[in-house]
Image (cartoon, rainbow, N blue to C red):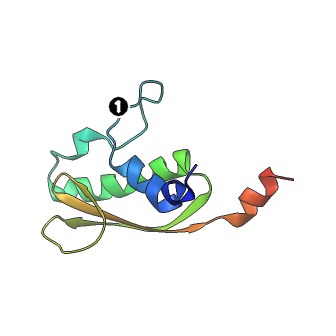
Amino acid sequence: MNEEFNTPEERINNLLNMFQGECPFERLKGMDPSLIDMPASFAKPKIIEHVKWLLKTYEPDISVNSVAVYDSDFNSEGVCFGNFVIKVEFEIVWFKLCLMFI
């Protein structure tokens, strides 16, 4: 397997670019599509909460430091989600990884 495609960044990107219901045996895996049509003032906090839950559930080897949601006209690197751009700052939790191999 090519390690370049199995980085935490790539796995996070994949999770944030998939919608719930796309993965046959993991129906909750991915972004909630109902958040796209909400007004920005309601959607942004819900998107942040959902992203934190999603990463805690499906990427336990990372610790989320912050999640920011911007309007799509904001020129920032991140994942596009409807009219929003999502930016996640995280760190790898090495201690948990080491305990799994002991």
Regarding residue 50, the answer to whether it shows in the image is no
Regarding residue 75, the answer to whether it shows in the image is yes
Residue 69 place in picture, x, y as percent:
28, 64
Residue 32 place in picture, x, y as percent:
31, 41
Q: Residue furthest front?
A: 2
SS state under label 1: loop
Residue occupying the point 15% across, 45% down? 37
Return the residue nearer the eye: 75 or 68.
75
91 on left or right of 96: left
Residue type highlighted by circle 1: Glu
Q: Residue furthest right?
A: 102
Vertical order, 84 against 24 (above or below): below
Quarter residue 35 falls in: top left
Quarter residue 96 falls in: bottom right
- Reading the image, the residue beneath label 1 is 22
54 on left or right of 48: right
Residue 36 place in picture, x, y as percent:
19, 47
Residue occupying the point 31% across, 65% down? 78
Residue 47 place in picture, x, y as percent:
32, 53
Vertical order, 93 against 59 (above or below): below
Return the residue nearer the eye: 93 or 66.
93
Return the residue nearer the eye: 44 or 88.
88
72 on left or right of 96: left
Residue occupying the point 58% across, 60% down? 62
100 on left or right of 93: right
Q: Residue furthest bottom?
A: 75
Q: Residues within 10 Å of mark 1 (few under 14, many from 20)?
A: few
Q: Residue furthest top?
A: 24
